[in-house]
Amino acid sequence: QVQLVESGGGLVQPGGSLRLSCAASTSALSFYVMGWHRQAPGKQRELVATVTSGGSTNYADSVKGRFTISRDNAKNTVYLQMGSLKPEDTAVYYCNGGLHSGSGYYPIYWGQGIQVTVSS
């Protein structure tokens, strides 16, 4: 059974930085697209960023220039480096692994989520 475990969340002040990590239980996910979603209270879950097995990345407009997704296939780990954080970045962040098709990214495996709170 594939497991994804997030770490690195917490409370940070506006303008600060935080790095999320996602450790996968299997190296098989090195062949998958990996991504991060987030869900703020009362809002729909949204896709934040994805990274392909080859390292190509894609970002939501709301985080472009502030967040960086990366992966280390040797460690079965995906990262989300978040900078210039804003209160509206407050959400539960979910790591996932899935596939691309012509119409978009389709997550298959999900982590349990980790809270990120941006507040002074």
Image: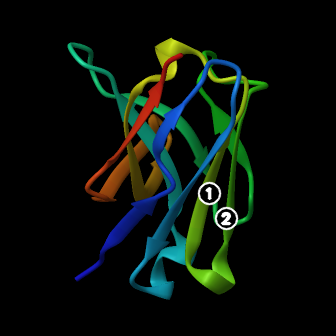
Task: Give the residue number, with chain letter if any, for mark 1.
Answer: 79
Q: How is the image coloured?
A: rainbow
Disc 1 or 2, which lies upstream in sequence? 2
Per the rendering, the mark at residue 34 is none
In the image, 82 versus 68, the foreground residue is 82
Name the residue rendered at 20%, 13% in the picture.
42
Residues packed near mark 2 inside 10 Å, few (<14), some (14 to 19) or many (20 plus): many
Residues packed near mark 1 inside 10 Å, few (<14), some (14 to 19) or many (20 plus): many
In the image, 54 versus 21, the foreground residue is 21
Task: Give the residue number, with chain letter if any, for mark 2.
Answer: 71
Q: Where residue 63 sits in the image (x, y, percent)?
A: 64, 23
Q: What's under tag 2, amino acid-wise?
A: Arg
In the image, 17 versus 100, the foreground residue is 17
Helix, strand or loop at mark 2? strand
Q: Is residue 41 above or below residue 70?
A: above
Name the residue rendered at 63%, 57% in the picture.
52
In the image, 104 versus 62, the foreground residue is 62
Name the residue rendered at 58%, 45% in the picture.
50
Helix, strand or loop at mark 1? strand
For the N terminus, the quadrant is: bottom left
Judge left or right: residue 66 versus residue 1.
right
Q: Is residue 1 above or below residue 94?
A: below
Q: Where residue 40 sits in the image (x, y, percent)?
A: 32, 22
Q: What's under tag 1, amino acid-wise?
A: Tyr
Alpha carbons under labels 1 and 2: distance apart: 6 Å
Considering every residue shown, the one lying at the far front of the view is 120
- The answer to which quarter of the image holds residue 83 is top right
Query: Pointer 1 and pointer 2: residues touching (CB < 8 Å)?
Result: yes
Q: Where residue 92 sits in the image (x, y, percent)?
A: 34, 36
- The answer to which quarter of the image holds residue 78 is bottom right
Q: Where residue 80 sits in the image (x, y, percent)?
A: 62, 48
Name the residue rendered at 37%, 67% in the picture.
5
